[in-house]
Amino acid sequence: MARSMLAAFASRVSLANFQTPTQGLTLAGFKTEILAGLTVALALVPEAVAFAFVAGVHPLVGLYAAFMVGLITALLGGRPGMISGATGALAVVMVALVAEHGVEYLFATVVLMGIIQIAAGIFRLGKFIRLVPHPVMLGFVNGLAIVIFLAQLTQFKVPGSAEVSGHGMSGGDWLSGWPLITMLALVAATMAIIWVMPKITRAIPAPLAGIGIVAILVIAFGIDVPRVGDMASIEGGLPSFHLPMVPLNLETLNIILPYALILAAIGLIESLLTLNLVGEITGQRGGASKECVAQGAANVVTGFFGGMGGCAMIGQSMINVKSGGRTRISGVSAALFLLLFIVVAAPLIEQIPLAALVGVMFMVVIGTFAWQSLTIMRKIPLADALVIVLVTITTVFYDLATAVVVGVIVSALEYAWQNASRIHAKVYETPEGAKVYQVKGPLFFGSTDGFVELFTPESDPAHVVIDFADSRVADQSALTAIEAVAAKYEAAGKKVQLRHLSRDCHRLLEKAGQLMVDSGDDPDYQVAVDYSVRTGILGGGH
């Protein structure tokens, strides 16, 4: 009951934070999609530049990745409304490769990463994302919200005083005095506009209105605050085809394969979790394998066109959805606007104050964080509450992939422990003098010790029946436990009979080479069998 309540809560929080009417293909809907794409493109610029710095590559390498990955996944991806591009989760892995071997090895790694992701899609590995429990999803959402917040802190430093950090916590000189006050005032103004705008009109996405109004004020009054151009110049040409200049040999493969595997895993985990989150908001399901293929194709192309690769971006996806983006049009337009900024409009875009973009991302943080998850901690099982906190902390201090893996493992262990404690038996004797153990609960590796402890071979009568009608034999450890019990009765010179084994258990016993005859005592299941330790069946005979 607690788990179902948690699942319902996660869906309700997401919908409450971001749900807007689904746009059709009307003229008004088309305009909303285009404006949503423009808003996303503006927010993508500083993010792509920042993540390029993290990876140790030129800003255009990050911008080209944001354009190409965003365009291809928007066209081919499994969830309309999702936004993909260069991300910090991948950049922090790339930095070591670039520092040791150079950017050409990065391009080759991105190509191999894409091939691995395509293979994952072809073999439908994306379906395993359903194994991620809701407590892990809540921890993922909360952790990513904190990471997005920390990443914005870099914008409160004096331009050029330090390299950009993925969490915004690198060294450097912080703004102080009037520059800091001005920056904070513009951030607050942007957030206020985003909050008020939907109450006035929905003709223009609120984040775009916030960016536009604050930018106009800054430019018109000549307010001296950090701007996009202070990070780096974003001016460039069209991306061109470029074969990675690396030797085609096993040595190169040994260098890039470990990085490619890690990047592919991180990219798919973040993309599939974002796919699920956007799906809850937009009411869509499925598409995991399709998204894997789209992400892989995007990275293969990006690697051949001088980009650093990427994956789904939860922050930009939330901006898009909250701005009304529901179709592929918004994602495609975001990518095309970004290319337009690079090729044509760089001087204008570089004048946008960073404070406006920070304000937009702060609103994303507020909307992304599942605030009510803080209030339900006392209502859900302690293990689920600990998983939420653990995944959140691990996401912030390590990375998303590690956080999800840790969360899934802890949740699985907790589930196994709960089931292990459920094994017990109802014991009674038949008129014929046989003792019946009616086993209840699953029999698997975690409950085998408890199962063995249920029996008392020394004091039991000569005929013992073990009834599995309310149980299930799940794995080889369970079969070994049955053998151990049978061996004890054999040593005591007594007979054991097994009843009501399910068909899948029947198959397990057959594979183990231990199933001999159908006893006929279970006409419904037709798989119950007599095991007589006197004939050596369970003792390893036959």
Image (cartoon, rainbow, N blue to C red):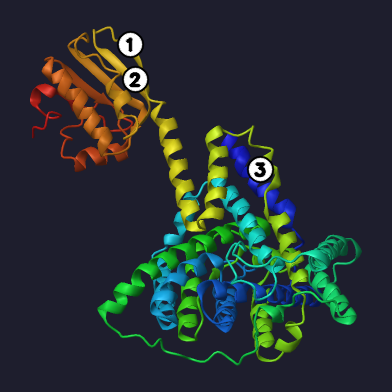
Type of amino acid under label 1: Tyr
Taking the image as shown, residue 5 lies to the left or right of residue 31, namely left
- Could you tell me residue 253's position as x and y percent? 31, 76
Residue 542 seen in the current view: yes
Disc 1 element: strand
Looking at the rendered structure, which numbered label has been put on residue 428?
1
Type of amino acid under label 3: Ser
**Mark 1 and mark 2 residues within 8 Å of each other at the beta carbon:** yes
The residue pinned by badge 2 equals 438
Disc 3 element: helix
- Residue at horizontal 66%, vertical 82%? 338
The residue pinned by badge 3 equals 373
Q: Quadrant of the C terminus?
A: top left
Q: Whole-Å distance between the Cαs marked 1 and 3?
A: 47 Å
Q: Nearer the viewer, mark 1 or mark 3?
A: 3
Q: Nearer the viewer, residue 260 or 223?
A: 223
- Residue at horizontal 62%, vertical 70%? 83
Q: Going from the N terminus, do you reach mark 3 or mark 2 first?
A: 3
Taking the image as shown, residue 276 lies to the left or right of residue 100, namely right
- Could you tell me residue 221's position as x and y percent? 90, 79
How many tags in the picture? 3
